Structure formats: C-alpha cells, structure tokens
Amino acid sequence: MMKRNHLYTMIAVAIAVLFVVYADNNFDPFVLRVFNLCAIYVVLAVSLNLVNGFTGLFSLGHAGFMAVGAYVSALLTMTPDQKEMNFFLAPIVPWLHDISLPFLPALLIAGLVAALSGVLVGAPVLRLRDDYLAIATLGFAEIIRVVITNVQTVTNGALGLKGLPKYATTFWVWGAAAVSVLFMVFLIRSSYGRAIKAVRDDEIAAEAMGINVFRVKLASFTASSFMAGVGGALLGHVLTTIDPKMFTFLLTFNILLIVVIGGNGSITGSVIAAIGVTVLMELLRFLDGPMNLLIFKTDGLPGLRMVVFSIMLMAMVIYRQRGLMGNREFSWQMVADAAALPRSWIAAVKRRARRTGGK
C-alpha cells in the first residue's frame, strides 16, 4: 500500500510539473499572471497558517514582512540605471546605488531581512496573547508602511519602485510554492512540529513537558516572516512595480481569508483556498465596475468584490469554523473514500428499494 501511494504521488508530481510547463508556454499573459499569483498566495497562506493555525498566534502583521521582502529584493536586483530613473525627486543613498545582485541571492536576502524583522518584532510582542498580539503586529505593519513612505532616499517614498526586473517567472513562483509546502510538511511532521502543536493546544502543559514556549513561538514567527518576505519579493517581481499602498491591512486580510476558508492548521486547505480565492478575485472583478442587471443598475461600486469575500468569511466563521479541510491533510485514502461514495449511495438506494419492494 505504501509503495502504491508513493507511485501515485510521483505520478501526481509529474502531472503538476507538466501542467506548469504547459501553462508557461500556452496561457495568455493575463491568465498566466493570475496562475502565478496563485503560487505566491500559496506561499503567503502557508506562512500565515504556520503562525495562526499551527502555533495558535493571532498575527495581523503579514503585510509588513511582505513589504520588507519586496523592497529589499527590488533594491538589490535593480540596475544603477533603473534606480536613477526611479529616484528623480531625491537621489538614492550612495551605498545602494551600485548594488545589483542575481535574483536568487536577492530573494534569500529579502527573506532573511524579513526574518530579522520578525525576530525584532517577535521578541517583545510574542509575550502578548490573542487580541493584544493582533493589535501589536498590525501596528508593526503600519509602522513599516509609514517608514517606507517617508524614507525617500532609500525606498523612493510614496512613488514606489517601477520597472523591476521580471525575474519571478512561472517556474520561480511555483518552485517557491512547492518548496514552501514541502518545508511545512516536513516541519509539522517533525518533533519540532509536534512541539508547535503542543504550544497551540495548551501552553501550560507544553511548558510542563519541558518545551520552551517562547522559543517555539519565536522560531515559528521567524520562519513565517521569512516566507512572507520571499512571497513579497516574488509578488514585486511578478507585478514589476511596488509602492507602500500595496501593503495595507487589506493584503493581510486577503491572506487571512484564505487561511480561514482553507482551515486553520491544514496545509492542504491553505493550498486549495489560495488557488480558489485568487481565481475568484479575478472572476468577480466585474462587481467593482458598472453593472446593468434586470433588477438594478450601478455606475460602479469599487470594493463590492471585497464585500462578497467578507460575506464568504462571515459565513465560513458562522457555519463551518474549521474551514474546508479543518486540520486534515490530503491523502490517497481520502481520494479512495471519495471515489467510493457514489458506490455506497447506489448500494444504499438498492437496499432501500429491496426493503420497500421496489416502490
């Protein structure tokens, strides 16, 4: 049975790789961008789920770590000529002017700087709990955004950075998504993952068992910050432009929406919800524009799309608090059980028909 599952997994991975290759060569630019955004939101969703779902911390500062990663990667990969074109109001600081690194080192440095920010923020605020922690991390995200807006000679202020090298190709973003998912799978299955879950379930009991609760929280928060920084860097290089208005609380809300819909504590749920919500965001974009329906007519209601997603979040919280997957993960046994459902329904109908004499 184990060998058969491994064979199924290898076949599924091969099909996924072939589909990514097909998408890169055949999708039109708009569809390909949405496809790549799905991968980036997978990275961001699993990173937030590590903190909120598996560790039990309510963090709302994800957009801040994304901003750090996006700006660090952009400043490290842009050429001196590109920096001069962007920094026309105030020249960039001399020590950043001539730096131009390949994408992979810049991506790793962006993640490390975001992780360092996570350590600096997490050391004081992770001693807080629940709403207080959420408010503190949300405040950090706003501080980062305000600092980026005002440090003109480093970040170009409110003008943002344009013309970023389009390094984040389909293979880069989906490769990053695959690495993030594999990292989460191995982490959660390890002894450290069991310690993370123990802290989430009962901090007092975990501490009584010899687990350093604060260290586990800080390590989880730092790893999540690293992945958020990488996700922000990938987002910047997919869109080829960044500015402080991108990294508001609304961005964190979108990622939190994905985690809640997919299920707190489910990697599979985060992946499914990230792809589904990202696609729906584009399919429902027409709601923000003018509509002429039979019962009413609008000239455009910007933000109506997010109202729909907010209603979805409210419905999920009210009627299915555990999300689509709860804390379950994908398995081939789950697929086999789902495939067996129609047969069981048919058998139940036949049994009922025999009992009622075919009536």
Image (tube, grey):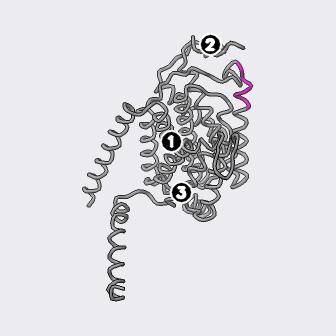
The quadrant of the picture occupied by the C terminus is bottom left
The percent position of residue 206, horizontal first and vertical second, equals 57, 61
Residues 232 and 240: in front is 240
Which span of residues is magenta-colored? Answer: 146-152
Categorize mark 2 by other alpha carbons within 10 Å: few (<14), some (14-19), many (20+): few
- Residue tagged 1: 43
**Residue 340 drawn in magenta:** no
Q: Which amino acid is tagged 3?
A: Gly
Residue 192 location (% of width, % of height): 48, 52
Magenta stretch, overall SS: helix
Q: Nearer the viewer, residue 292 or 129?
A: 292
Measure how far apart labels 1 and 3 are at the Cα level: 15 Å
Tag count in the figure?
3
Residue 310 in percent (x, y) is at: 65, 52
Q: Please state which of residues 293 and 250 is positioned toward the viewer in this rendering.
A: 293
Give the mark nearer the N terminus: 1 vs 3: 1
Disc sitting over residue 263 in the figure? 3
Amino acid under disc 1:
Val
**Circle 2 residue:** 85
Q: At label 2, which amino acid type do we have? A: Met
Give yes or no for contact between labels 1 and 3 (Cβ–Cβ under 8 Å).
no
Residue in view at x 72 percent, y 37 percent? 142
- The crowding category of the residue bearing disc 3, from other C-alpha atoms within 10 Å (few below 14, some 14 to 19, many at least 20), is many
Q: Secondary structure at mark 3?
A: loop
Q: Earlier in the sequence, mark 2 or mark 3?
A: 2
* Quadrant in which the N terminus is drawn: bottom left
Q: Is residue 151 magenta?
A: yes
Where disc 1 sits, the SS reads helix
Residue 106 left/right relative to 317? left
Measured as percent of width and height from the top left, residue 31 is found at 47, 36
